[in-house]
Amino acid sequence: MEKMRGLSQLFMTIFLHNFSTFMVIPAITDVTMAAICPGMDECSLAIYLSGFQQAIVGLGSLVMMPLIGNLSDKYGRKALLTIPLVFTIIPLAILAYSRSRNFFYLYYVFRTLTAIFCEGSVHCLALAYVADNVPAGRRASAFGILSGIGSAAFVCGNLSTRFLSTPSTFQVATAVAVVALAYMRFFLPDSVVVGDDDPLTAPIVSKGMPDGACPDDDSANKAHAFKKTPSLGDTVALLRSSLTFLQAAIVAFFGNLADVGLHASMMYYLKAQFHFNKNQFADLMVISGIAGTISQLLIMPLLAPVIGEARLLSIALFFNCVHMILYSVAWAAWVPYAAAMFSVLFVFAHPCMRTIVSEQVGSCDQGKAQGCISGICQLANVVSPLVFSPLTALFLSDSAPFHFPGFSIMCVGFASMIAFIQSVMMRVAPISDGRVSNCHTLA
């Protein structure tokens, strides 16, 4: 009963946090264009700035995600969740106050710095929290429900944006972000017990000592504390721990490479090609979100136990590839809306991949494993804008080598196809009892 209560409160926290972050997505393109290139539907500078921001955030998160995941294994999920929930408020509050050019650049700087801690960390810690409280055999359904909660917040956030003015959108988002932080701190129980100290105030240097060490053995204590900090060797050890984990990491990289490339290019592409604005972006995202929410909450819990996570992952990645290619060749304004309906199937990819990863490590390494995969996803976040932002700007400009405005999105679809091919080759091996009982060997 206590675990179920904790999960319900986690889901509410994730819903509120995602609601606040998702509701500004349809508006941010118009805000960016109005601040940098007022009165224009195509602006290469806006595309390059967005790509540069994503690359910097990905580079920083590449370091931070494994660190956050690893520290949450020791100091508790709740303590580490506090950091991104606090930082999320700052850039939203800036645009809630003003969206002039100077305030936009101030937002840009703070968004870049805070996103290093926030980008992906809330979801990573939520996955580890769910894994703490749900048996391995039921995690696919639980991860699907978690993703469904995120999709529901996506729908509600974008639907709210559809009926709010741009200033009100950022003001409401800021208020909801504050509520998410307060709710988490007051109501969410921690799923990792760290001793008598409260997780938020537990010392970063461990008080524990290696077996056989004397109380005054300061060097041994320091070595033990140092080993708690993740390193490149820890990531390599995890990747070498099983072939399945390595294959899942490859799928995560190319899948995220494609997703980030699509999200970075799609709105600028649709604005230039079909003159979409905030309302059309919101409509498109609501359609995708509703389809994804229904699928994750109702269909995935039924399909995952029957056909397995690996096969469901392959199905999702295949339809993800198809929907990206359909975006790239859109010949009318209604085609993106039709492509968005494919989210009924491609939303399975992320929870299935995370479930496979979760089942490859023991219970005390869930944060480390999810942080490792999140770090790999952030590596894709670095590479993707460096490749696809210049490509998008080139093919939306008058100097394109040939007329194909959606060429960058077509290339994004090819990256998703690589993830699909790797998923077909994946063979999920169950974790051995020995590895479950000795999960600290990777620490």
Image (spheres, rainbow, N blue to C red):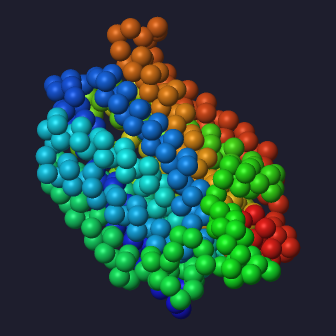
| Residue extending farthest front | 216
Residue 172 spot, x, y in % from top left: 20, 60
Image mark count:
0
User: In the rendered image of this protein, does residue 177 appear above or below residue 412?
Assistant: below
Q: Nearer the viewer, residue 48 or 419?
A: 48
Residue 295 spot, x, y in % from top left: 51, 60
Residue 29 spot, x, y in % from top left: 28, 37
Task: Say whether residue 57 is visible.
Answer: yes
User: In the rendered image of this protein, does residue 437 appear above or below residue 268?
Assistant: below
User: In the rendered image of this protein, does residue 396 appear above or below residue 189?
Assistant: above
Q: Quadrant of the C terminus?
A: bottom right
Q: Residue at x 28, y 59 (%)?
A: 89
Instruction: Give the image quarter of residue 131.
Output: bottom right
Q: Residue at x 18, y 41 (%)?
A: 103
**Left or right, 260 with reference to 16:** right
Q: Residue at x 55, y 47 (%)?
A: 62
**Left or right, 83 with reference to 68:** left
Instruction: Give the image quarter of residue 304.
Output: bottom right
**Left or right, 13 with reference to 191:** left
| Residue extending farthest bottom | 1
Q: Residue at x 47, y 83 (%)?
A: 198
**Left or right, 103 with reference to 401:** left
Task: Say whether residue 283 is visible.
Answer: no
Residue 49 spot, x, y in % from top left: 35, 30
User: In the rendered image of this protein, does residue 336 appear above or below residue 126?
Assistant: above
